[in-house]
Image: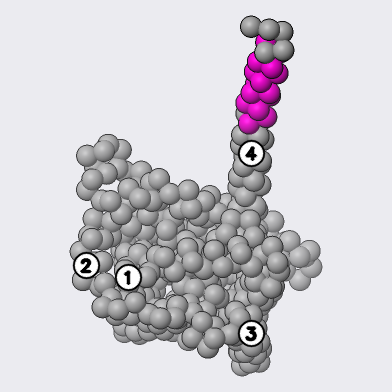
Amino acid sequence: MDNKAMSRQRVAKQQSGNARNDGDEKIAGDEELSSRKSALSMIACVLAGITFGFAVEKGRVFEPAAVRGQMSFSRFIMLKMFLSAVATGMVGMSIVSMLPFGKPKFDQMRVRFFRKFVGKRGVLAAGLGGFIHGVGMTICASCPGVLYIQLGTGTPNAVLTLCGALSGAFLYGMVELTVVRLSKPGAVACSNTLDQFLGTPYFVAALPIAAMLATCVFALELFQPWGSDLTQPNSAVASALELRAWPPYLSGMLAGSVQGVLVLTLGDVIGSSTSYAALASLVLVTEKMERLSPYLRSYKRSPAAWAQVLFCLSSVLGGFLSASFSGAYGTVPGVTGLAAYLGGVIMVFGARTASGCTSGHGLSGSGILFLLSFVVLPAMYLGGVLTAAVMSVLQGQV
């Protein structure tokens, strides 16, 4: 072999080696970038959860008296905060949907959200699940998202409600195949959202609705000022952090502001009831046990489900911090142990049947104008109101 041929071989080997090195460096660089994005997403998830928990505690909607009072129309703090959070979330997500870098994430989030329902949940099943969820809410005086804040604030018997919620998630996991078979819709809806039905961009439909919700909050405040709904008044002299309660519309705006952040960082929205399915799946410790419930097994290996667990656990910390600043930790009366556990079971079983709760369907589903959520929410409220009426007749029995 002549010198020129040998030289060409050496050059080819060197180029091949350089290409492999460049490829390895690119893979390593991609992995490092992915790790950084994952770390930033986790940090954003934790901060969003803390903010949400802080806002809910300051809004006082975690108090059992506020939950039951809303269902009996004697207190309106919960409704004011809820409407404020939905309206703020709509504004935030409208902004995200109009940004060049935000619209793809917003669209992907909605596709993932719809995927939980298409071909799996009909109107009847979603409405029935919402009704059952509302019944459980009134009995335990909580909801899947609020329960985490009750844990963080030392609300009596909140741990029993958690045990009931996990039991409800596990029970649903055992019968999920039957529920889906019985509730599967005969046809898939052509439009998933109000804006798709109207043929307009999301923000064109969402912003006027947000304005109407804000008007409703204003009217409710004129009808019954938020201070009259407090179980204990604020201190005469205190900083904002030390105040026991904030106006529900401000707390709602703070909670709702989390939506846009979650869409941009995680491609997701606020939800709570999925976290109980993920936690309940930990009971399935062997492959044989996992075969008992493919539903729970899917959550055991779902990054999105565990991201929701992280968000919810962070909200426990947010509630604890807020209560600690104001000296309100452990000062809120709870419900009886029986009501806490039984209500928790019913509440989460209903939420899983409807594939969402007051957070998933309420704050997020209605926020993204998901049509099925507008079926679940009235059913949820109806279940809660009727249960409150029965409990008022049987006062002292639960």
- Disc sitting over residue 181 in the figure: 2
Q: Earlier in the sequence, mark 4 or mark 1?
A: 4
Percent x, y of residue 326:
68, 60
Q: SS of the residue at dot 2?
A: helix
Based on the displayed image, in which of its 4 quarters is residue 233 positioned?
bottom right
Residue found 37% across the figure and 80% down from its top: 189
Check disc 3 and report the residue beneath it.
204
Based on the displayed image, in which of its 4 quarters is residue 328 positioned?
bottom right
Residue found 64% across the figure and 80% down from its top: 203
Q: Earlier in the sequence, mark 2 or mark 1?
A: 1
Q: SS of the residue at dot 4?
A: helix
Work out how far the residue at label 3 is from the one at label 1, CA to CA, in angstroms. Answer: 28 Å
The crowding category of the residue bearing disc 1, from other C-alpha atoms within 10 Å (few below 14, some 14 to 19, many at least 20), is some
Check disc 4 and report the residue beneath it.
30
What are the residue bounds of the magenta stretch?
A: 6-23
- Which amino acid type is marked by label 4? Asp
Work out how far the residue at label 2 is from the one at label 3, CA to CA, in angstroms. Answer: 37 Å
Work out how far the residue at label 4 is from the one at label 1, CA to CA, in angstroms. Answer: 36 Å
- Which amino acid type is marked by label 2? Arg
Please identify the dominant SS of the magenta region: helix
Residue found 79% across the figure and 68% down from its top: 237
Q: Nearer the viewer, residue 266 or 255?
A: 266
Work out how far the residue at label 4 is from the one at label 3, CA to CA, in angstroms. Answer: 38 Å
Percent x, y of residue 260:
65, 66
Percent x, y of residue 359:
49, 68
Residue 106 shows in the view? yes
- Disc sitting over residue 119 in the figure: 1
Q: SS of the residue at dot 1?
A: loop
